[in-house]
Amino acid sequence: MAFKMIDSNDIQNLCSMIGDEERVLVGEYIKEEYCHDELGGTFCTPDIVIRVLTAQEISDVMRYAYEHEIPVTPRGAGTGLVGSCVPVERGIVIETTLMNRILELDEDNLTVTAEPGVLLMELASFAEDHEFFYPPDPGEKSATIGGNISTNAGGMRAVKYGVTRDYVRGLEVVLPNGKIVEFGGKVVKNSSGYALKDLIVGSEGTLGIVTKAVLKLLPLPKKSISLLVPFPSLKQAIGTVPLIIKSKSVPTAVEFMQREVIMDAEEYLGRKFPDNQADAYLLLKFDGASTEEIEKDYQGVAGICLEQGAYDVLISNTEERNDSIWKARGAFLEAIKGSTTYMDEVDVVVPRSQVNTLVEYIHSIEEEAGVRIKSFGHAGDGNLHVYILKDQLSDEEWERRMKRAMELIYSKSRELNGKVSGEHGIGYAKKPYLFEAEDPEVMNLMRGIKRVFDPKNILNPHKVCEE
Amino acid sequence: MAFKMIDSNDIQNLCSMIGDEERVLVGEYIKEEYCHDELGGTFCTPDIVIRVLTAQEISDVMRYAYEHEIPVTPRGAGTGLVGSCVPVERGIVIETTLMNRILELDEDNLTVTAEPGVLLMELASFAEDHEFFYPPDPGEKSATIGGNISTNAGGMRAVKYGVTRDYVRGLEVVLPNGKIVEFGGKVVKNSSGYALKDLIVGSEGTLGIVTKAVLKLLPLPKKSISLLVPFPSLKQAIGTVPLIIKSKSVPTAVEFMQREVIMDAEEYLGRKFPDNQADAYLLLKFDGASTEEIEKDYQGVAGICLEQGAYDVLISNTEERNDSIWKARGAFLEAIKGSTTYMDEVDVVVPRSQVNTLVEYIHSIEEEAGVRIKSFGHAGDGNLHVYILKDQLSDEEWERRMKRAMELIYSKSRELNGKVSGEHGIGYAKKPYLFEAEDPEVMNLMRGIKRVFDPKNILNPHKVCEE
């Protein structure tokens, strides 16, 4: 497909459309960060970056781009890991971080309405300040809500509370042709035609650009406690997870981690973790309305852990201690990144009964693939984050070994009835693996849907399902 | 669009494809019930009814129909209310009630896998027998799971637990071209391409035919109590609901009902309701792991009700009493149906803060529209079931007054930012109201998606978004 190359005439038109020079970046004013995301594996320089303020501005730009067949790539805070926000055909980047207002707290309907550029940490703390709870909790708190919606971000509390899609009630969206439409609303139930709202969530900015989101809130749980459980071995730690799920207790989160990742995090944060003596750990959270409510649940789980050979069960029930543990957990990605020269990641998800099989397998292939691999993740929901580290490998050797490791991991995940991505999305980097994993008929349906929304294929081209 | 008329050659081919004469019905063997659904407003006789046993049979029939451009309408138990399962272009009806096996209970992944013809009541009791909980709880317990998925059925527990879509993890689906595909799986999170699983849910059998569903289960709540709260007036009862939601308590269900509907139910069931003296009632349920856990919640709500003028708060904490109240509630639709000659229904949903405004409005238009109107419904989630009764009106007069009442109700609902259907779907009967409510651009997207799945428009034509 041939897009129009942006020329000085387009730039002039777009500039006068926005009317504020400081929000339109071209040439040397485009900082290097606009050319990649957090992981940096996909790199391309846009012709123009527009820092939009309103849905109407996005609509105007999209309409112009649609008419002139100029590719447009939406971008939030750029914290993605699969290249979704990288303008691989150059053209226009629409950057939404200035659309960062929380528009309404509706206490009668238990919803909050936010612009896409609001950061997750801002939204979460706004909710808490009003005694409400926004459950989705990915490690990356400086992602935008728009970005979270675009990948259907999950996070640590998905075990009990589900993922971003479960908290999106309504969306305002600019379509590729520039029209502004609404999907869903403040209603709790909706069976009025196809689930377009649910389709936009997780579509990684390829079907439309989210300009406003009505999000569901829950009452803030009054009590929470965390358990840090050291185990002699990874096998024992991760082997305990299916037993916890099967016990019908309902933890909010079940994370697993290994000593070396904890030590990376200690170095990165300059702060000690409560314990770093054991080989592997489970970190669990329970929340509820009262201590009594959660006590039974967590005591049962503590018992299971000890039966499975845990050294101890460290209970953390003060906000301060909880905070310090979960902050360390939230820093794992950055910490691992800091421990090597470069890395690539795998975000597979498998049925949770298989999470131990997959973790053990990944651990076993380091030698075969000839690379260091670190993993941690959401053991309770079967979603692992696996990092393959470049260290001192030559580019060529890295490419070879990394691909081999990826192939092994994705192929094992398929064997276990897993999926390519649990929460980071497909973007640009994971397309080959999605194509390999899914029935060609299913990929055809996705491409068909893409063409319905974007017949000229100008919005975030070459992502998710497009060659 | 012109479909092929089924001829004796087609019938012969389809018969030999199935190879079991008893499961292929034609001519006088097609019972009248196959020509309509529960409400009966849409009526059309199919040319052939095939009672399928396997996904492969559905695939074979669909492939044949696709090749020959014969319309196909899927049908479960026929308990729908908007004509979704009525073969308005005649052709083939694929009836799934014989695909009624529960295939697997996976206690490690907390899922149950079922064929589409399993009845909701069978699934719910199967889950309970194994100490699990399948939360979606529409009043109509003899609907099939396939039907519940097709309309994204909600039910009474949606206030706390959400709707059918929230419990569908994976689907096996036969596409209009006959191919069998899978969407989702047993994974808890999934960000691997567009949300096709979520799109199929609620598509009312227009995009594919569900042949297997992997459903999420929860641990069975150990305790539940119900509160039956009599109020002097409808206005006071329904006006209390927004205060309950705002109080941040989390009831499982909040239903409202009026005396005359209760009396219909008493007559229909031949059994007394615990109380029928007050004008209006709220019926609430709370569940949790222990009595203590739910006590605080329900005591707070009881207090709010009494402050708002409730006569009393009748607490029901035995299974037997709970059962009798909720069975009566489940029979409301049938009871109202039995109290008149014919009726039509409205299944609007509004933001829950507006539910009192809408109920009061509906109550106020009986005179203006010149028809009796009865309503009850899911006050806690803003979803009302409103029944317009024909009584002794002439057909002509009925048509005129019913349409007037519908227009008034849907228009008020739009004004309150509501949606046409909360859980019954659009089907054939509610299309005009969906077209009126939604942006034409949105309807175009829906039709575009329909064409992607079904380019020949043979699967359940003229439903949901198709003229």
Image (cartoon, coloured by chain):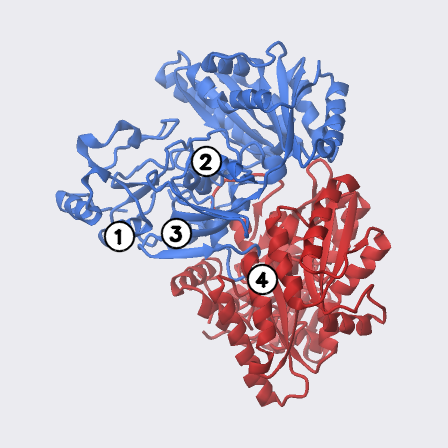
Chain colours: A red, B blue
Q: Which marked residue is nearer to the observer: mark 2 or mark 4? A: 4
Q: Label 4, label 1: how many angstroms apart (C-alpha)? A: 37 Å
Q: Name the element at disc 1.
A: helix
Residue B264 image point, x, y percent: 49, 14
Q: Label 2, label 1: how many angstroms apart (C-alpha)? A: 27 Å
Residue B444 image point, x, y percent: 45, 50
Callouts 1 and 3 in the same chain: yes
Front position in the image: B310 or A346? A346
Q: Which residue is mark 1?
A: B60
Residue B121 image point, x, y percent: 46, 33
Q: Which residue is mark 4?
A: A355
Front position in the image: B194 or B156? B156
Q: Name the element at disc 4.
A: helix
Give the quadrant of residue B379: top right
Q: Earlier in the sequence, mark 2 or mark 1?
A: 1
Callouts 2 and 1 in the same chain: yes
Amino acid under label 4? Answer: Val
Q: Residues within 10 Å of mark 3 (few under 14, many from 20)?
A: many
Q: Which residue is mark 2?
A: B120
Kindly tell me whether residue A4 is visible in this rendering: no
> What's the mark number on residue B173?
3
Amino acid under label 1? Answer: Asp
Q: Mark 4 falls within which chain?
A: A
